[in-house]
Image (cartoon, rainbow, N blue to C red):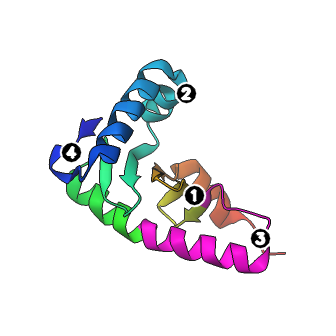
Amino acid sequence: MKIITNLLKDARDEWLVNTAAIINEVNPVIDRIMEDESIEGVIMTNKEGAPILTNISSIKATNYGVSLHHIGKLTQIYMKELDTTDEVLVTRIRTKDVEIMVAPHPEFNIILIQNILPHIQTENLKATPI
């Protein structure tokens, strides 16, 4: 992953970068996710939605980070209105080309962008409505 040093705003962001780097080194699951050919990108953002760690271009990471930060905040607010005892663990957004998963945390977000595999797209198009 590329560390976008000019976007680090404070010591907390640096702490998150160092922590994520350690986790990435010792956690083979994250490595497997990033090696999957259907994964377009993995982004870790700070609590404002600015990318801290990513394996995609910084412009694309910033666009995803800021946009999904707003969606994540709204999702958490609406979930609390529906059930005050529940919390959002992952938000999934699926378009015809990609599936985006956002895992929120009070200090950061993890965003995963996955391409929809061609055989899954065609299977879904052939499905008959109920």
State if disc 2 and disc 3 touch (CB < 8 Å): no
Q: The residue under label 1 is which amino acid type?
A: Gln
In the picture of the structure, the residue carrying the numbered disc 4 is: 4
State if disc 4 and disc 2 touch (CB < 8 Å): no
> In terms of sequence position, does the residue under pointer 2 or pointer 4 come before the other?
4
Tell me if residue 2 comes above or below residue 58 in the rendering. above
In the picture of the structure, the residue carrying the numbered disc 3 is: 128
Horizontal placement of 85 versus 103: left or right? right
State if disc 4 and disc 1 touch (CB < 8 Å): no
Tell me if residue 2 comes above or below residue 110 in the rendering. above
* Residue 5, horizontal then vertical, whole percent: 18, 44
Q: Which mark is residue 58?
A: none
Q: Would residue 122 be seen by someone viewing this image from the given angle? A: yes
Q: Which mark is residue 121?
A: 1
How many neighbours does mark 3 have within 10 angstroms: few (below 14), some (14-19), or many (20 or more)? few
Q: The residue under label 2 is which amino acid type?
A: Val
Quarter of the image with the N terminus is top left
